[in-house]
Image (cartoon, grey):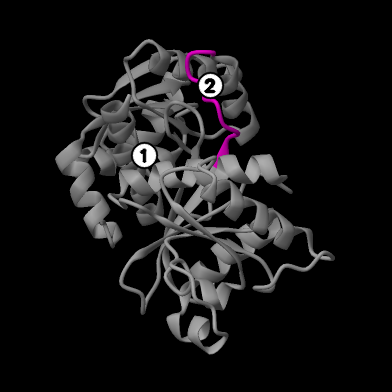
Amino acid sequence: MIKTFDEIVKAARERGPRTIAVAVAQDAEVLSAVSGAKGKGIAEAILVGNAREIQRIASRKSINIDGFEIIDEPDKAEACIRAVELVSAGRADIVMKGIIDTSIILKAVLSDVSLRGGNVLSHIGVAEVNGYDKLFLFSDPGMNIAPDLSQKAQIIENAVGLAKALDYDDPRVAVVCAVEKVNPKMPATLDAKELVKMNQEGRIEGCIVGGPFALDNAVSMEAARHKGIDHPVAGNADVLIMPDIEAGNILYKSLVYFAGAKCAGLVVGAKVPIVVTSRADDEEAKLNSIALAVLLAKNKQKTG
């Protein structure tokens, strides 16, 4: 089991490199991230966008893009389509968003039948939190606003796929709610009960699902014992399935700004990883997201 981002970067170096198709690459932060990834032996990149702007930005910011292929496509929507086509043609393994709205790059991915997966796309965060001896995966800080039961089942499958790429053999998935008891007035707890049943019946495979759990008894053995919760996931969750985008987003930003956690994330559910970073993410978070994508791309190749 990979337990830190340093281990993620090391594993990505050993299992990579993979090639990233960067859509609308004329952005200093994105160019810096892919240049850093190449410098660490993690990834190569094909830069799609306004070639003159890409070269101007790289020169002005002293970013080394030597060796990267540049495909000149000034139109941003077309650049997204070209980047996606590079992946579907087998020339790249990962799609990365440059200076373009997330909805446009995702539309290009979903329009390509060869890349569209069977599941809903979801954003999975990964956090390294001080005081814990492992990484936490959690949904959905940036995509699905109010997922229904079926979408939550698919989000679990997406998260488990990423956990497997991080060498979690049988990830423990906690369906997080405000309370740890089923309450008919709280729909998230009813979904949690049904997701556990789906797991027990083999409709959600490759993991152990427990819930509903409040956050404390999902991640703290002491809290779980104090409340008398006896379940393999209780206090020892690897994956946290949050009830909606507000909860996932607030968790993500609380970890970063209050706990000083290292965080990264990917959009998953397609047949290839999609790196969608925020301008608020620092360079380390962007590099960690690329390393995550490399591991997931390698695992998808291995498992077919």
Helix, strand or loop under label 1 = helix
Q: CA distance from mark 1 to mark 2?
A: 17 Å
Extreme residue toward the top, this view:
89
Locate residue 68, reporting x and y percent. Answer: 27, 24
Task: Using the image, tell me which numbered label, if any, was put on residue 293.
Answer: 1
Q: Image height check: is 267 above or below 212? A: above
- Which amino acid type corresponds to the residue marked 2 in the rendered image? Arg
Extreme residue toward the front, this view:
201
Left or right of residue 213, residue 168 in this image:
left
Magenta span:
113-122
Locate residue 61, reporting x and y percent. Answer: 36, 43
The answer to which image quadrant residue 111 occupies is top right
**Predominant SS of the magenta segment:** loop
Q: Nearer the viewer, residue 303 or 56?
A: 303
**Residue name at image x 52 percent, y 25 percent:** 117
Quarter placement of the C terminus:
top left
The answer to which image quadrant residue 134 occupies is bottom left
Locate residue 168, reporting x and y percent. Answer: 32, 52
**Residue name at image x 30 percent, y 29 percent:** 303
Q: Is-magenta flag for residue 268?
A: no
**Residue name at image x 56 percent, y 53 percent:** 139
Left or right of residue 175, residue 12 in this image:
left
Q: Nearer the viewer, residue 37 or 211?
A: 211
Extreme residue toward the left, this view:
14
